[in-house]
Image: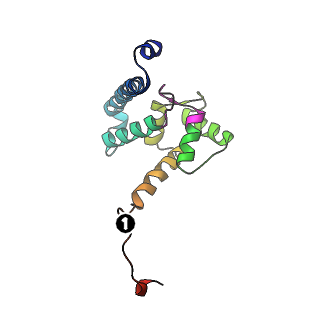
Amino acid sequence: MSVALSNRFQGGKAFGLLKARQERRLAEINREFLCDQKYSDEEDLPQKLTAFKEKYMEFDLNNEGEIDLMSLKRMMEKLGVPKTHLEMKKMISEVTGGVSDTISYRDFVNMMLGKRSAVLKLVMMFEGKANESSPKPAGPPPERDIASLP
């Protein structure tokens, strides 16, 4: 499908179509989680799933619906927590149960909603808390006079 897509569209148009297709796939998976009785008691589930989808799409570099080792490396560096190759392999193994070398969206959501505290979950939660707790001031700094200086 991507070969036919790239023949008809190029550049931003093709990328936009890939992202739209990926968003539809992830939204369908989110609907499955919303209908699952296992997660019926989860607070703010629709909002959480929307946030998970956006975060996942940000780091799914190849738009294949999987986060591979390089995507995870980029994620950890962007979050300010660089990891070694072996640490990242261990993180992927924790999330997937050792079954795969990539993190699917289902694995990602199961990890984020699950009771186990995978390292990746802790990093993602830390990033969310860090962004909430320190809002950046907008605009120019306030003017100060000589008397207010220490």
Q: Where is 148 relative to 63, above or below? A: below
**Residue 108, position as x, y percentages in the image:** 48, 36
Q: Splitting the image into 4 quarters, where does residue 110 fall?
A: top left
Q: Is residue 62 magenta?
A: yes
Q: Which of the 4 image quarters holds residue 137?
A: bottom left
- Point 33% across, 41% down: residue: 45
Is 28 magenta? The answer is no
Decide: few, some or many residues near mark 1? Use Cα within 10 Å; few <14, some 14-19, many ≥20: few
Question: Observer-nearest residue: 131 or 105?
Answer: 131
**Is label 1 in a helix, a strand or a loop?**
loop
Q: Quadrant of the N terminus?
A: top left
Q: Amino acid at mark 1?
A: Pro
- Whether residue 140 is visible, yes or no, is yes
* Residue 109 seen anywhere in this rendered image of the structure: no
Q: Which residue position holds label 1?
A: 140
Is 80 displayed left or right of 35 in the figure? right
Instruction: Tell me: residue 65, above or below residue 40.
Output: above
In x, y percent, where is residue 70? 59, 35
| 28 left or right of 105 in image | left
At x 35% / y 39%, what residue is drawn?
Answer: 50
Region in magenta: 59-71
Q: Name, please, the residue furthest toward the bottom.
A: 147
Count of numbered marks: 1
> 28 or 142: which is nearer to us?
142
- Look at the image and name its color scheme: rainbow
Residue 52 rendering spot, x and y as whole percentages: 41, 39
